[in-house]
Structure formats: structure tokens, C-alpha cells
Image (cartoon, rainbow, N blue to C red):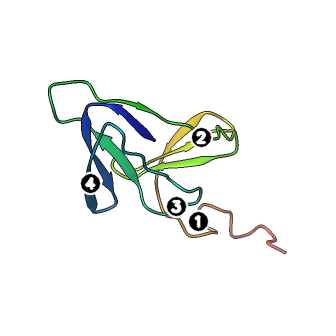
Amino acid sequence: MLILEGHATLRMGEQTYEVSAGDYVCFPAGQAVPHTLLNEGTKPCRFLIIGEDNPHDIVVYPDSEKVLVRATQEIYRKAVLEYWEGEDESEDTG
């Protein structure tokens, strides 16, 4: 992400960073830290993002506890389940 104009606050996990025109930030694939760009000012912050639009990506939105599956373009509520939860116990799990 390259900040073209203005300034904003970048939140990465629990850390925050002030970014302004000329700053750039890289978000490596597989990064386990969520990131958000917040413009809390009154002027626009314009930025450019260059990256791969992989149709097999899974995107996790930790603030709203949602998960996007790009292959199906479906969004789900995040929940942690046991592997066999909801399966019929009488079926052969072979």
C-alpha cells in the first residue's frame, strides 16, 4: 500500500502507526496479523494497493468475526467447531 495523499492510522494487530503521503507498507501473504487503515481526519487519504486477487483466498475479518471465501463469494460468521460436531455418530467414519 502506497499513501498518495493525506494521512491515516494503520492498525496492525494491537499496534498503530501513523502513515502519510510517500509512506508504503507491505502485507505479506499468510500474515497472521489483521490490518486496517483508518482515516480519522477531515481530509481524504488516497492510497494505492497492488496485490494478487487470488480466487482461492480466505479472508478473515476479526473485528466483525466474519470469513470471506472468495471462490464462492460467500461470507460466514466465524465459529470454532470440533471436527465431528454435527455429524451423525451412527455413520461409519472409517
Q: Position of residue 75 (x, y in %)?
A: 52, 39
Give me the residue at 79% from left, 72% from top.
93
- Few, some or many C-alpha atoms within 10 Å of disc 1 (few <14, some 14-19, many ≥20)? few
Give how far apart the Cα atoms at labels 3 and 1 are.
29 Å
Identify which residue is drawn at 50% across, 36% down.
49
Asked which secondary structure carries label 2, the reply is loop
Q: Which residue occupies 32% across, 36% down?
A: 21
Give the residue number, with chain letter if any, for mark 2. 51
Name the residue that disc number 4 marks: 17
Question: Whole-Å distance between the Cαs marked 2 and 3?
Answer: 14 Å
Task: State if disc 4 and disc 2 touch (CB < 8 Å).
Answer: no
Q: Nearer the viewer, mark 2 or mark 3?
A: 2
In front here: 34 or 24?
24
Marks 4 & 3, CB-CB < 8 Å contact = no
Q: Nearer the viewer, residue 24 or 81?
A: 24
Q: Which mark is residue 85?
A: 1
Name the mark on residue 31.
3
Across and down, in percent, residue 87 comes to 66, 62
Labelled disc at residue 40: none
Q: Does label 2 or label 4 sit earlier along the sequence?
A: 4
Discs 3/1, front: 3
The mark lying in front, picked from 4 and 3, is: 4
Q: Which badge, 4 or 3, comes first in the chain's sequence?
A: 4
Where residue 37 sits, quadrant-wise, is top left
Q: CA distance from mark 2 to mark 4?
A: 21 Å
Residue type at numbered disc 1:
Glu
